Image (spheres, rainbow, N blue to C red):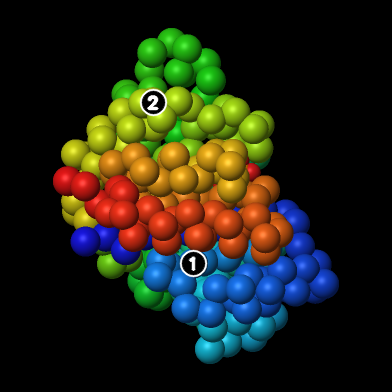
């Protein structure tokens, strides 16, 4: 059975004072029955790891370079992320693909770098609105999955997040049927059927339960709603409830 995962992506948000949100979340959820992960900006990684020491909330980064080290001003490498005590890294987020022209081939190379140091890679993919309107969604996500996951990706080292670009930060979400269609499709294509599949894009306390009830949804990658302990805590609770009822575990 796949253990569910609630992952928070703080993006370029968060100063030292915001560590209190993670601490509040940890106090409110001292023994979560699902995996919980927060991915703060790189500047907070070390302090977040310290703040959550001995708490059942993991810490991850939001990107890494393909190389171990070198002349790459401003980048951080997978070994540096592992060195902070973080255990995961988001790769291929649509904002990286758009803002930094990251290709799926680069995402695969970054995933290899993450795996080499024992980081869990959370590999993101998803269609644009134009691609959905053109009926290309399944073709686009299939191709992204094929090119972004390297040899050796498995349930131990990789999580895949389906994030429709048009649903990120917009308050708009696909219908439950549309999410189910993509997740069922991706599940059949995964190199390891036990790789967890997260949905991401405007997940919030109000819609989390219905999304988590979808078969083949193993959790969420949450942006805006992960910044506040109350909101993210409600999403964690909804995921725990889905697990309690069997939710996405239905075959
Ligand atoms: P959102 O972002 O929850 O703010 O829509 C999700 C993401 O980009 O991971």
Residue appearing at x 49%, y 67% in the figure? 36
Residue appearing at x 51%, y 66% in the figure? 37
162 to 31, vertically: above or below? above
Q: Which residue is mark 2?
A: 178
| Residue 218, x across and y down, in percent | 35, 52
Q: Specify which label sits upstream in the sequence, 1 or 2.
A: 1
Asked if residue 251 lies left or right of residue 242, the reply is: left
| Residue 179, x across and y down, in percent | 39, 32
Q: Residues within 10 Å of mark 2 (few under 14, many from 20)?
A: few
How far apart are the alpha carbons under marks 1 and 2? 25 Å
Residue appearing at x 41%, y 30% in the figure? 176
* Residue ranking furthest to the top: 134
For mark 2, give the secondary structure: helix
| Residue 127, x across and y down, in percent | 46, 28
Give 226 or 76, whichever is nearer the viewer.
226
Q: Does the residue tagged 1 have its C-beta within 8 Å of any atom of ligand 1?
A: no
Circles 1 and 2, Cβ within 8 Å, touching? The answer is no
Give 43 or 151, whichever is nearer the viewer.
43
Q: Which residue is mark 1?
A: 36
Asked if residue 237 lies left or right of residue 22, the reply is: left
| Residue 152, x across and y down, in percent | 23, 60
Residue 129 visible in this rendered orientation of the protein: yes
Displayed-image quarter of ligand 1 = top right
For mark 1, give the secondary structure: strand
Residue appearing at x 33%, y 33% in the figure? 180
Asked if residue 53 lies left or right of residue 135, the reply is: right
């Amino acid at each position: 059975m796949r253990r569910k995962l609630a992952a928070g992506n703080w993006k370029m948000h968060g100063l030292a004072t915001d560590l209190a949100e993670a601490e509040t979340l940890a106090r409110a959820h001292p023994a979560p029955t699902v995996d919980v992960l927060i991915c703060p900006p790189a500047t907070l990684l070390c302090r977040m790891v310290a703040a959550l020491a001995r708490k059942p909330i993991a810490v991850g980064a939001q990107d890494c370079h393909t190389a171990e080290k070198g002349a790459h001003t401003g980048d951080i490498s997978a070994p540096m992320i592992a060195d902070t005590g973080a255990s995961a890294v988001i790769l291929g987020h649509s904002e990286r693909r758009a803002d930094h022209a990251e290709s799926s081939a680069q995402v695969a190379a970054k995933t290899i770098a993450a795996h080499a140091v024992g980081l869990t890679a959370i590999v993101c993919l998803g269609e644009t609105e134009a691609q959905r309107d053109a009926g290309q969604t399944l073709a686009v996500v299939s191709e992204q999955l094929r090119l972004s996951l390297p040899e050796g990706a498995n349930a131990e080292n990789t999580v895949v997040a389906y994030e429709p670009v048009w649903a990120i930060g917009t308050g708009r979400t696909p219908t439950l049927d549309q999410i189910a269609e993509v997740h069922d499709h991706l599940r059949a294509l995964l190199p390891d059927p036990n790789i967890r599949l997260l949905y991401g894009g405007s997940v919030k306390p109000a819609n989390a339960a219905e999304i988590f009830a979808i078969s083949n949804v193993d959790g969420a990658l949450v942006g805006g709603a992960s910044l506040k302990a109350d909101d993210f805590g409600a999403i964690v609770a909804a995921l725990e409830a889905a697990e309690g009822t069997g939710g996405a575990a239905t075959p």
